[in-house]
Amino acid sequence: MKVVPSRSFEQIRKLRRRVNDVPGAVVMGGDYQGLGIVRSLGRQGIPICILDDEHSISRYSRYATYGVRVPDLRNENKVVETLLNLAQRLDLKGWVLFPTRDELVTALSRQRSALSEFFRVPTPRWDTIKWVWNKRNTYWLARELNIPIPETWFPDTPADVDEITTPFPLALKPGVKENFLYATKAKAWRANTPTELRELFVRASEVTGPGHILVQSLIPGDGRNQFAYCAFFKDGKAVGSIVSQRLRQHPREFGRASTYVETIDLPVLESLSERFLRAIDYYGLVEVEFKLDPRDGQYKLLDVNARTWGYHTLGPSAGVDFPYMLYLDQLGKAPEPSRGKPGLSWIRLLTDVPTGILEVIGGHLRLRDYLDSLRNFHTEAVFSREDPLPSVVECLLFPYLLLKRGY
C-alpha cells in the first residue's frame, strides 16, 4: 500500500487537527466519477482520502488529502483488509466510505459489521443489495412489482438457450456484470441468430460460470431511448432526485457509459423507481436505468446501480449535490430536500468527441446539432477552472484508460 500525500505535510497536519470535528471521506475509485465526489465534499472543507488500484486522476485534485494506491480492489477480503489497515495508519475513524464500483458496493455491504467499527458505511445491508447485485434477482422482483422489463429468459445450459424461439435479435448479458465486463470490456452481446446466441452463451458462461447469464429481447434504439432516475433515497422517498435522458453513449448499442446527458421531467420514472426502492428498503445514492421500448411505449427497467453514477456531477448544476447530501445524512444532519431542474446537460468530452464524430459519420446525428451541444452544455465531467490539473492528467492517461477499460 502506497500512501501519497496530495497536499503538503503542513496542510495535512492542520487537517488532521480538525478531523475530530470534521470527519473525512474515503473515495474508493479515483476516475471521473470519484473525482466528482472529491470535489463535492472538498469544496465543503471535508478531508478526502482516495483509494484506487488504478492510475487515476482524482489524487491530482486540489481537494485531495491522501492518494492511496493498492494492488487489488476487486477481491472482497482484500478490500476489507485494506480499509481496516488504512483506518489504523491514517486515523480515519468515523470517515464516510464512498464506493464507485459494483464490486466495492458488494464488499461493503457484505462486510458492514466489521467496517462499521471504524467507518460510516452508507451502503445498505446485503438483504437489500442482493436485489440489485444480480440482474436475475432484479428482474424477478420487478415482475412481482409489475414494473415493465424486457422479455427475459434465464438459461442455465445451452439446451435451455435452444428453447428460446422469440424473434431475433436478442441481447445476452451477465447477471453479475463485474467479471464479464473486466474480461470482455462489453456490457452485453448482440445475437442475431439462434446459432450465434448458442455460441455466445457458451463463451459468456466460460467467463461467468454456469447460471449467471440471461437473455433479453433487444429493445430498439440507442442512448436516446435510455433514461434514468437518480436519487438520494431514504425512508421510502427521495430526499434529492433528478431524472435524465442519455443522449449519447459508448459503445452506441450497449453503452458502458454515458457521454452526453440531459435532465428532464418524467414523473412515470419516479413512480416506477420508487416502487422498486421501497420494496427493498433502499437507503443511499442510486441510479435506476430504463429504456423506452418504441414497440409498446413502455419504459422498461434495465439496471439498478447502488452507488454514484458517471454523470452525478450534473446534480449541483440542477440543484442536487448528491455526495454532500449523503455525507450530511451520515453525520446525522438532515440535508435540504431538493428536486433537480430539467433542461441541464452534462458531457464527458474525452469520450463524447469520438462518439459524436462516429454518430455524425453514421448519419445518426446532424453535425449542426452536435456542434450546438458542444457549445451549450452546463457541466463537463472532468474539466474545472478551479481544479484544472485532473483534466490535464486524464488526457495524458488516455492510452492507459484505452488499454485498461476499452475507452
Image (cartoon, helix red, strand yellow):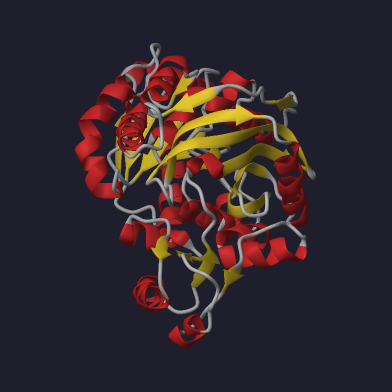
Can residue 245 be seen in the rendering of this structure?
A: yes
Where is residue 406 shown, x and y percent of the image? Answer: 29, 48
> Does 311 sit left or right of 297 as displayed?
left
Query: Where, by quadrant of the figure, is residue 14 drawn?
Result: top left
Q: Is residue 365 left or right of residue 23?
A: left
Q: Is residue 404 left or right of residue 367?
A: left
Task: Note whether 198 is above or below 2 in the view shown.
Answer: below
* Along the viewing direction, whichever of 407 and 83 lies nearer the viewer: 407
Residue 316 on image: x %, y %: 58, 21
Residue found at the very far top of the displayed protein: 385
Looking at the image, residue 306 lies above or below residue 147: above
Spot the residue most to the bottom. Answer: 159
Frontmost residue, 377 versus 210 = 377
Using the rendered view, name the quadrant where residue 206 is placed: bottom left
Q: Give 38 or 222, whichever is nearer the viewer.
A: 222
Asked whether the viewer can see residue 23, the reply is no
Quarter of the image with the C terminus is: top left
Q: Is residue 65 left or right of residue 315?
A: left
Q: Position of residue 290 (x, y in %)?
A: 61, 48
Q: Determine the image quadrant of residue 209.
A: bottom left
Q: Residue at x 55, y 51 (%)?
A: 115
Q: Who's the residue at 40% across and 35% down the image? A: 50
Residue found 43% across the figure and 54% down from its top: 79
Residue 227 appears at what percent x and percent y?
59, 41
Q: Which residue is depicted at the point 46% across and 49% down?
A: 84
- In the rendered picture of this protein, how many numbered marks are placed on residues? 0
